[in-house]
Structures are given as C-alpha cells and as structure tokens.
Image (cartoon, rainbow, N blue to C red):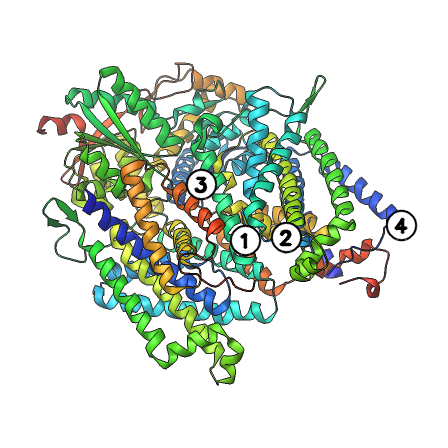
Amino acid sequence: MFTQVLVGAIAIGSIYGLVALGYSLIYTASGLMSFVQGELLMLGSFMGLTFYKYLKIPFYFALPLTMGCLFLIGVIIERYIIRRLQKAKTNLIFIVVATIALSIILKNFAMLAWGSNVFQFPPIFSVSLLKLGKVRIQPESIMAIVIALLVMIILHLFMTKTRLGTSMRAAAQDPIAAKTMSINVNRTTALTWGIASMLTGVGGILIGPIYGVSAEMGTLIGTKGFAGAVIGGYGNMYGAIVGSLLLGIIETFMAAYVSSMYKDFVSFFTLIIFLIFIPRGLFKGKVYGD
Amino acid sequence: MDNILKPKSSSSFQIKWIMLIILGGVLPFIFLGDPYVLILLCTTEISIIAVSGLDILFGYCGQISLGHAGFYCIGAYTSAILSRNLGMPVFITIPIAGFFAMIIGILLALPAAKLVHHFLALVTISFGEIIYLFVSQARGLTEGYTGMNFIPRPKIGGIIFTSNTSYYYVIYGILVILLALKQNLVASGTGRAFVAIREDAHAANGMGINITKYKTMAFAISAFYTGIAGALYAHLIGFISPETFTSNQSTLFLTMLLFGGMGNFWGPIIGSAILVIITEFLQKLGSYQMLIYGAILLLVIIYIPGGISKGLNLQLFFKKSKRGKIAC
Amino acid sequence: MRLKKGLAVILCIFAIASMNVAAQDVIKVGFYGPLTGPMSLSGIASRQGAELAIKQINANGGVIGKKMVLVPYNDNSSPEEAVKVVTRMITSDKVHCIVGSLHSGNILASAPIVEKYKIPEIGVGTSPTYLQKGYTYIFRCLANTATIDIQIGKTIKELNYKKVGALGLSDEYGKTGVEDVKNVLDSYGIQLIAEWFNPGDTDFTGQLTKLINSGIEALVAYGTDSYQGPIVKQARLLGFEGLIFGPESLSVPSVLEVAGKYSDGCVFGTSYIVPSKPEEAVDKMQQDFFKAFVAEFGKMPESQTAMRCYDAVMIFAEAIKRANSLNGTAIRDQIANLHDFRGLAGTFDFRGGNGEGIRESRMFAIKDGKYILLSEFLKSYKK
C-alpha cells in the first residue's frame, strides 16, 4: 500500500508543482498574485480533451498544441488586462480581483461550452494498468511525473542557460536596471505569463487522464498550488516544486493513514503555520515590497 | 485621499443627513412592503454593514482581507446557535456574535499584523478557508453541511419581527448606529492613525504610532462589524449552511467595496446597492448569470478604476467644503 | 455625473417594473433549481422535464380550461438564493404551485415561506430531511435516499457479506446516506467502515486503498452525480472487484462514460433511469416519455431529474383537476390523498401523511455496460 500511496502523492504533488511554478513566476515578474491559475489548468485539461478525444489528434501532438494555446492565452491576459491595469495605477488588490473575475468567466465559460459533467480522456496507453508486484499504477500517473519533471528541467535550463531566460530573471529582479541593459521588460513580462499559463496547462492535460476533466477541477487544485508555492517560498521556483511535493505527500498520506475527512483542513493548516512562522517558506522567497 | 479632517458643522449639511435617514426609513413604503423587495433591501443593509467593516480594515487602514467571509460566518453561526439551541434572546445574541467575531479578529491580527501585501492576503484567505472547513466538519456544533434552520427572528416583549418589513427596521436602526460610529472613528485620532498606516507604515512608525496596536484594532473593529452583519443575515434567512460562507462571499464583499469606492462613507452603501440590483437582474439570464457577472466585474475594474462613488462624486454633495480643501 | 445618477434611477425603476403581476387565467407553475454551478446539467434537465410536461398538458387543452405556464428561477445551489426566488415567485409572480429544487438544502431553506403562504410544493431532491420537519405543504414524488438505503442494506445482507466499506461525500447527502446505511447494517450485525471526501476532491486513492486493504467485501459509494464515476473507476483500478452499491446518483450516464467496463457490478436503487435509447426503457410509459423528450429537445435527457419534474407537474395537473380550483390548500389536500395516479416512477400514494409519494425503489445493476434489474443480475452473479 505504501508504494501505491506514494506514487499517487508524487503524481498529485507534481501537478501542484506545475501550478505553483506558475504562481511563483508571475509573482516574480509582476509582483502579483494571480487567481486565475486554477482555471487555466482546467482550460488546459479541456483543450487537451477536445484535441485528443473529439478532434482525434494524437496525444503527442495534442500536448504541445495545448501548451501553445495556453501560452498565447497567458500572454494575452498579461498584455491586455494586467498591463493595462498596472498602467492605470489600479490598487494591487483590485488587479487581484480582476484575476478572480477572469477565473469566474473561464469557469462558467467552460461549464457552458462543455457542460458541467465530469469528462474522461480516452486511454492514452494500450494498457490501462501497470502491475508491479502488488502495486497497481495507472501509466498516466507515471507519465504525469515524468513529463512534469521534464518540463521543470527544461524550464530550469531555459532560465539559467539561455539569454532570454536570463533576461527574464533580470527583468523580474530589477526592471529598471534591466531596461538600462536594453532588455525589453514588457516582452519578458508577457513571456513570463505565457510560460506560467503554459505550465499550468500542462498540469491540466496531465491530470485529466487520471482524475477526469470538469469545470470545477481548477478551484481546489489552484488553491493547493498556491499553498505549495507559499510553503516552498513564494517567488522561488525550486521552492514551489519542493513545497508542492511536500504538500502532495502530507495530504495523500494523511488521507490514507490517518483520516480522509481532514485532508483539506491539514493543507490549510500547514499553510497557516508556515505563514505565521516561516512566511518566507523553505527556500526564502522574496517578501515583496516590504 | 479623502477628507477626514473636516468637522461636520454646517446646518445645511445636517439637513442632508436627516433627509438621508428619512429616505432610508421610508424605502419599504415606496416598495409597498413587497416581501421579495424587502428581502433585497434587508440583504443590502446587511451587506452595507459587512462592507463597512471591510472598509475600516482595508479602505482606511490599508490591510488586505480576502477572508472576511470568515467573520461573517462566525457571527452568523454564533448568533444562530445561541438563539436557536440555547434559547437566548436574539437582541442579545447578535451583539455577542459581534464580540465573539471581534475576539477572533484580534487572534487573527496576531500573525496578520506582522505581514503585508501578499502574505497578509494569504493569511486571510487561509483564515476564511479554515473557518469554512471548521463549520462544515463540526457537525455536533453546527450541523455541518446540512445547515441550521429554524433560526428565529428577534422579539421584544410579545412582538416577533416576522415580517420582512419589521425586520428591515431592526437592521436599519443597527445600521444607522454603526455607520455613525464609523464616521466618528475615522474622524478621531484612531482613524487618522489608520490612514497614516495605510499611506506609509514606516513613516507612521517613525512618528510614534504603534503599528501593531492600531492594526489589531482595525482587525477587531472590522471583525465586529462583519460579525454583526453575519448574525443579522442568519436571522433574516432563517437558514444557514457552510456553502454561503465560501471565498465567493469574501470576493463579493471586496467587489462591493470596489464598485462603491473605498475609504469613504458612501462606498459601502453604493457598492452594496449596485451589486444587489445587478445580481437580481442577472437572474433573468438563467445559466449565463455567473458568466455575465464575471464579465461585468472585469469591465468595471478595467474601466472604472476608482470605484463608482468617485465617479459620482457624492462625497461633495454631502461635504460642505470646496474641493480645494480636501486633504489627500 | 448626472448621467450616471440618472442611470441609477432608471435602473431602480426598471427593477420595480420588472416585478409585474400577470393575469390570473393561466396556471403558474413555479420552478427553482440549480441552473448554474456544478449541478447545472441536472438542473437544466429537470427544467426541461417540467417544460415537456407543461407542453403536453397544454396540447391536451390544459387543466380546468386553463393553460399552464412555467415560471423558472435559478437558485444557483444557494439557500439564500432559494429563499429569495421562492419569495419572489410566491409574492410577486403569484404562482399556484411549485416544483422544488434538486438541492434538498434549498428546499429546507425556503420551506417556511411555502408553508406560510400555503402554496403546495413538490420537491425533487432525494434527501429525507426536508420531509421530516413537519411541513404540510411539501411533498416528494420519488423514492428518497432512506428508502434506497434500506434496500441496499437488505441486498448486502442477502449476499451474506460481513464487512463492507463506504466512501461518502462529506455533505448532507453523503453523511445522511452513509449513516442510514450504517444503521441498517448495524441492525444485521454487518460491519461498515466509512471514509470520506470533501466537495471538490477528485483523488480518492488514499481512502480507497485504506478500505480495500482492510478487506471489505463490498463498497458503498455515496457521492453526488459527478463523483460516482471517478469513485467506481479508481476503486476498480486499485483492484477492487466486489460489488459497488450506491443511491440513485450511481444511475447517472456519466458513471458508464467515466468508468467504462469497470462499471459492471454497480448496484443502485432509483425511481428513474435513463437508458441509451428510448426503446430500452423499462415500460411503455417511460418509452413514450423518452420519445417525446427526444422529439422536443433533440436528445435523451442528460439526467433522470427530467423525469422527476415531469412527474411533479403531472401530479399538480391531476390535483388541480380533482380540486377544480387553484387554491393552494385545495390542491395540497388533493395531493395528500392521491393514491391511484401513475407516473414515470410508478404508482403514487401520498396517503402516508408525511408527503412521500413513493415508498419503494426499483433496484438495478450494471452488467456488460447495460442496466438490468437487480433481480436478474443476482440470478447469474457468483461471489
């Protein structure tokens, strides 16, 4: 049983990690908390579903296609909504409310477009179950872990080894200095949002085959991803991953070995403990603008 | 930002206030006592109280709260449990509910006063979620997801305020008192300290203002107001269940503040009224209701950044002084 | 500024004007249900069922010479909304009867209003609680979950299981349901281990693993519609091969869609079931209903809730005809004495005094992806 629970925990933790990465990236680049990440995950899931199930596009095309769409959506949100609000010097909290409004729009749009049911992905692999000894694992869970890992590694390489990635980091850390180095801060910010949305979208298309797709799926996962980012250190990319894995493990093991009723309680409680005693998280994220 | 230093002294000014109070008093008659409209009016009044609480914390003191539904919830359940399960008179359980919410507000301020911006927001979100989870799971106390019904209306002597119209006046009385207290608060030294903290906490600290003390006070008072609102809500609908007190409710309060404008007297009033009217209109749209609501919200944020009361400039209608004298 | 103020005033006038009072020569049937939110699919289906019934009645000349008209509202699964819309439909729209929400909590919240204004309401939510509080104007036209729970318990006993697991949604529906089943099983000396999940959860691995490892012989899945499919699928993927019992939420088409071949071995009770084609319906009356539904809306109903509301409207029509009046109390009295009226759920008998119209539920099982009667299933089932 232990291995089974562990695999489930790491799988869900990886998904939280992708969402948390999105949050951290956006926070680092724009100094904002975006509440639309959960719904972007849901959108990614639905898009993946539509491409793979209804348009019969093979999965290995559907995945990057979804990623591309989500990337564009992220850029559009930044360019036409966030940047506009920032230019108008709108109070930060209302920009946050704007992202909440976006999430309401996306969730209800999904409900109207696809319906309020839970939808299923057709099987991606030819075996529906892997049996290793006494342990039964869905291959989709393994795929989720592997692809999430891959994405994170690529992201890390991109951010540290490429010029574009480095200029994104520079712009986030100090926009004015970056501008003097002729880095186009507007462009890098838009890119950051695009990447954040893309990551979350990947999370959606990975988790869809495991648990199903529904318009409601984004809300809870979004919040947990948030918690993961905070636990790991808000604004810190690696912290986001570690924090999320930790959260996934605490949560799933709690439900399996102690009590399933208090699963969510535990997550929020952990979040509050961290906020009170270790607000910078495990990896000392930025306490922005203090 | 707003004129909080001007004393209220002119007689034409006071006449306007009296006109306003009378207007609020006759509203039920304008609508012919229609029970449905009265529910809307009562809901608006309750929202005004709750949002005024949020305004004190956020509009005046600058502390973000995305979890105010937590206080609303505490107020509602406290008053419901005390009045229905323990048989205490409603006019007593409502203030108790407010004070209990205030205590929780002080407890929340312990960690919250040390945090700013996003961390503060996160703590308040977590607070809201934990309160929701608590009332959902504590079945012995709150009946969990089933909800509590048969919550009584208040009564005095032999008179029970069953009709929506009569209950409207109960809330109205409480509303007027609380709003007057709020105006007093913001004009006082405490109010000025709040604004100082909002504008520049470090400078305020340097001037000798005890940040922790005043932030805690802001949380406490804000929680009190919203807790009272929650209690009034429980007795209005007669039924409460955890699903009313989710983060959607917190967002709704914040939205009302946004629509109406923060840090002024009219903001909560206009914001609540507009939102209640909008949501009733959206009823006609059936399944598209929430989608359009989200769209309206987004559009208002983008196109009317200061909130509607700024646009309407109702402030000036009620203040004697000319524009130039408004302190910013 | 003036413009905005003017706009505000116009808005207010609009608001008042839109609450108009219409003529009295139609029969107004109020309806409220979740048209938005996670249960919206069922909510919309339920409204369609009511609309179909009204259309058929009007095509046959209406009732006591008047046409019926539906006055639908969205309660968004919120009790506060329910109170508002029920107040509105009674006091502003002046409805004569109400087809109540799927959401039992909402029926409970608005019950005092219905009782006060003496307007009969037929609820279509399955939780037993709203008929246990002493309201005299509220009824139900389908088997409630308590009835089904008793039958689940009986079936488990007949199969000689000793240890059974339950996975329940920790809301009113799930908690009451699992408790009911537990009480029934306790009286037979059968052990029930319960695990829970919260609204919004999609991952039941932890809970299911725990149950399976403790050696349960059968599982009771007690979630609302959208959770049942995932529960069944995950349980089977984790290696559980026993029967999976559940209330009527296990009868939704999405279980077949989500769990596919894993849904074999599901057992549930329900007053209504939606097959994949009208021809596969259990009796002629249901067949006719499905054919008419497809003709009107283009496809089979998304949820059996459509059938509930269809029956509810038909009952009202019958009661109004017998009362020959639109008076709320007169209609109510007719329903309370109704015992020979046949609907899609079976023959109604409201004479028990507590508002319940159907006392026994049909039991079904899934085999080879099809719904068959439980009695048929058990003939060929080997433990």
Q: Chain of mark 1?
A: B
Quarter that holds the C terminus of chain A? bottom right
Residue, disc 3: C34
Q: Are marks 4 and 1 on the same chain?
A: yes
Disc 1 residue type (three-letter): Leu
Report the residue marked by disc 2: B58
User: Which mark, residue B120?
Assistant: 1
Element marked by disc 1: helix
Q: Which chain hosts label 2?
A: B
Of tags 2 and 3, the one toward the viewer is 2
Task: Determine which quarter of the picture holds residue A88.
Answer: bottom right
Side of C266 relative to A22 (left or right): left
Residue type for callout 3: Pro
Chain holding disc 4:
B
Q: Nearer the viewer, residue B256 or C17?
A: B256
Between the residue at mark 2 and the residue at mark 1, the CA separation in whole angstroms equals 12 Å
Query: Which residue occupies the foreground of this view, B296 or C328?
Result: B296
| Mark in front: 4 vs 1 | 1
- The residue pinned by badge 4 equals B9
